Image (cartoon, rainbow, N blue to C red):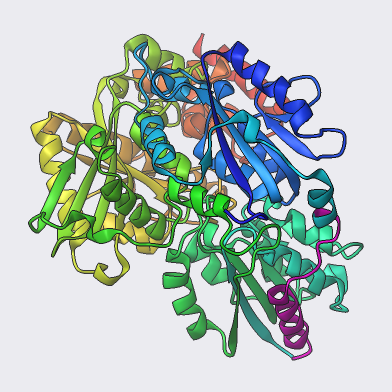
């Protein structure tokens, strides 16, 4: 281990009390008066503390040490985020229960995933195996030493790396032209956002001529920090697209962490600005993957002329070949190696894999994760823990020539009690998972479907070289046959409602069930829910829900609340005029009056209560009425149905 390498220390403790004693012991060793650091976990005297699920708010900062107390909750994303904050020659100290008991320790994250009293974390066992096999781990608390002077001097005098300066020069040259397109790619910690900030500061642009967009403003903290007084507007991707279309004064668009934005929305964003700078992490914990370069970048050259590329390889806060970075990447499957041939020995076909068994075959698990990471813009290490530790999860793999070519992640949902279903309908319960039945119960008001059994396709991914060859459709057919044999009622999925994605599901026999009411600020479209019936009773249920949805959308179109039928519903027949309310609709109206059911569900039925009432108070009611309008309407509905 080089003298300037950052260190990973793993301390195992018998109890929470012993963990806190160990943290207190670290006070002297870390020279807290002259060192800057963070404690991830519950607050403790003498330390700046933060919860694991809030660590992303610190991205862009530089610290000398980070203590991660896993007794207070462990998430893979937080471990990677914390490692990215530590500057050389700093230290990341991971404090955990003893390896022999850690998989059974019900930390808050595991408790949120597991719905039983018998806790066991397959993911933690996988992590322990990786920690035990790493040669870069320090396990002795007495070995935790830092030269605070060296670390502080290093952090205070960070200048642009040669890679960053080259990017700044390239950008300034680009912006001297009438139009330009620059794509900047890098792994985590290479300072791409900072380079953009330096360039913007020297650009000569007016701040109102520039828009910066990213999935989350936290991703561009470094950009704004380095741009000093030059502070362009930040807008989420969907907002940025709207501004570009309506404001001709925008000359420059900066898209940071572009791989975490839905590709169809990116395609629209890049067409709208004279000058475009696109930056992204291509190998990181945020869910950004190389699928970005394989899909979006291939099309960018067709959309814009003269695309220029820059790559940052030199780390900013640590040395090239840093051992902590290497170890974290190995532990969290963030390495660039594509281990798709981990299924050598498998005959060609589709396989259902046992998740417990995958822990003892990390090469196969890594291949599965890498394919999900490659193919879906939101896959992150946290998903791997959800997959391994949540009940009702399963993986199906498609293999050709001993190579993994397709993966489908299935989540079993439903079988909810009548009491829980009613609580969901009233908006007082939101149990973990169960996206399909919860959406149908609350947003569609079909409470009786909670007891039915669902298999949701959480992810489906095909290796880039094998796309459009029928692999995904074949996997779905295999899974559907397994579902029918297991007496499942419905298969379903939810995704950003783009036409091209819908066409795949339509071709596979799925029906559009519901278009969400809110636009995803990153995907740029509301979520489209699709389902397929696996028995006669389920077929009747889907027909009922579809007719109800079409009726609602038609009502909204006729009253100017919607411009056209949503994707997936355009070709469905116009419903017959309804003259009476069903018992299901009356129950939904009662829930609306009580403040639980959404207005979007019951708006058409309110008109049936009384025509005069509807014309006076419903026709011109906005899609998102203020709380006073909504309260008045609920009171009026209550008078009619009581």
Identify the residue at horizontal 35%, vertical 14% (top origin).
Answer: 116
Please say whether residue 557 is visible from this viewpoint. Answer: no
Query: Residue 57, image x and y in percent?
Result: 70, 42
Query: Residue 378, image x and y in percent?
Result: 48, 51
User: Would you say 360 lies left or right of 347 here?
Assistant: right
Identify the residue at horizontal 29%, vertical 64% (top origin).
Answer: 463
Identify the residue at horizontal 32%, vertical 22% (top origin).
Answer: 450
User: Would you say 313 lies left or right of 537 here?
Assistant: right
Q: How many marks?
A: 0
Q: Is residue 99 above or below residue 354?
A: above
Query: Residue 236, image x and y in percent?
Result: 66, 55
53 and 579: which is toward the camera: 53
Query: Residue 270, image x and y in percent?
Result: 59, 74
Check residue 293 for magenta coloring: no
562 and 430: which is toward the camera: 430
463 and 49: which is toward the camera: 49
Magenta region, mostly helix, strand or loop?
A: helix
User: Would you say 222 lies left or right of 127 here?
Assistant: right
The range drawn in magenta is 155-177
Identify the residue at horizontal 56%, vertical 17% (top origin).
Answer: 593
Please say whether residue 337 is visible from this viewpoint. Answer: yes
Quarter location, residue 482: top left
């Amino acid at each position: 281990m080089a003298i300037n390498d950052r260190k990973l220390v793993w301390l195992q403790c018998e109890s929470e009390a012993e963990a806190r004693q160990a943290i207190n012991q670290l006070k002297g060793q870390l020279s807290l008066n002259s060192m800057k650091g963070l404690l991830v976990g519950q607050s403790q005297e003498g330390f700046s503390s933060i919860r694991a699920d809030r660590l992303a708010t610190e991205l862009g900062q530089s610290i000398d040490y980070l203590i991660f107390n896993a007794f207070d909750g462990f998430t893979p994303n937080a471990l990677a985020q914390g490692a990215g904050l530590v500057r050389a020659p700093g230290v990341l100290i991971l404090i955990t229960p003893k390896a022999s008991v850690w998989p059974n320790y019900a930390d808050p994250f595991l408790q949120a995933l597991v719905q039983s009293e018998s806790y066991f974390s397959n993911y933690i066992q996988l992590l322990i195996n990786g920690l035990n096999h790493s040669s870069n781990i320090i396990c002795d608390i007495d070995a935790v030493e830092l030269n605070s002077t060296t670390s502080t001097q290093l952090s205070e005098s960070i200048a642009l790396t040669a890679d960053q300066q080259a990017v700044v020069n390239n950008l300034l040259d680009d912006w001297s032209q009438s139009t330009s397109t620059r794509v900047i790619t890098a792994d985590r910690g290479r300072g791409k956002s900072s380079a953009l900030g330096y360039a913007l500061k020297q650009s000569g642009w007016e701040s109102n001529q520039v828009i910066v967009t990213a999935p989350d403003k936290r991703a561009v903290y470094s950009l704004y920090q380095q741009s000093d007084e030059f502070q362009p507007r930040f807008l989420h991707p969907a907002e940025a697209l709207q501004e570009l279309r309506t404001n001709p004064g925008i000359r420059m668009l900066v898209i940071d962490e572009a791989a975490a934005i839905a590709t169809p929305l990116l395609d629209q964003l890049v067409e709208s600005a004279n000058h475009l700078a696109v930056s992204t992490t291509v190998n990181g914990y945020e869910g950004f993957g190389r699928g970005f370069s394989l899909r979006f970048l291939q099309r960018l050259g067709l959309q814009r002329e003269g695309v220029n590329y820059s790559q940052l390889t030199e780390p900013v806060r640590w040395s090239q070949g840093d051992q902590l970075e290497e170890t974290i990447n190995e532990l969290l499957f963030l390495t660039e190696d594509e281990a798709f041939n981990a299924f050598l020995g498998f005959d060609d076909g589709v396989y259902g894999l046992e998740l417990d068994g995958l822990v003892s075959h990390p090469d196969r698990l890594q291949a599965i994760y890498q394919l999900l990471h490659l193919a879906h813009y939101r896959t992150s290490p946290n998903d791997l823990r959800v997959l391994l530790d949540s009940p009702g999860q399963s993986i199906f793999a498609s293999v050709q020539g001993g190579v993994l070519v397709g993966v489908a992640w299935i989540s079993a949902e439903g079988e909810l009690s009548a009491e829980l279903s009613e609580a969901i309908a009233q908006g007082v319960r939101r149990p973990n998972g169960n996206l399909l039945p919860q959406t149908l119960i609350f947003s569609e008001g079909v409470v009786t479907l909670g007891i039915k059994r669902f298999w949701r396709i959480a992810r489906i991914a095909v290796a880039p070289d094998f796309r459009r060859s029928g692999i995904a459709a074949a996997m779905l057919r295999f899974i559907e046959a397994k579902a029918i044999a297991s007496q499942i009622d419905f298969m379903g999925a939810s995704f950003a409602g783009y036409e091209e994605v819908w066409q795949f599901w339509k071709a596979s026999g799925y029906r559009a069930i519901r278009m969400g009411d809110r636009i995803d600020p990153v995907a740029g479209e509301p979520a489209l829910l699709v389902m397929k019936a696996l028995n006669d009773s389920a077929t009747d249920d889907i027909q009922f829900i579809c007719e109800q949805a079409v009726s609602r959308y038609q009502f909204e179109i006729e009253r100017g609340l919607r411009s056209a039928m949503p994707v997936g519903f355009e070709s469905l027949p116009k419903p017959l005029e309804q003259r009476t309310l069903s018992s299901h609709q009356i129950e939904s109206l009662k829930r609306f009056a009580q403040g639980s059911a959404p207005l979007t569900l019951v708006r058409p039925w309110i008109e049936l209560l009384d025509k005069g009432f509807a014309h006076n108070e419903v026709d011109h009611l906005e899609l998102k009425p203020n709380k006073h309008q909504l309260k008045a309407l609920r009171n009026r509905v209550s008078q009619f149905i009581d």
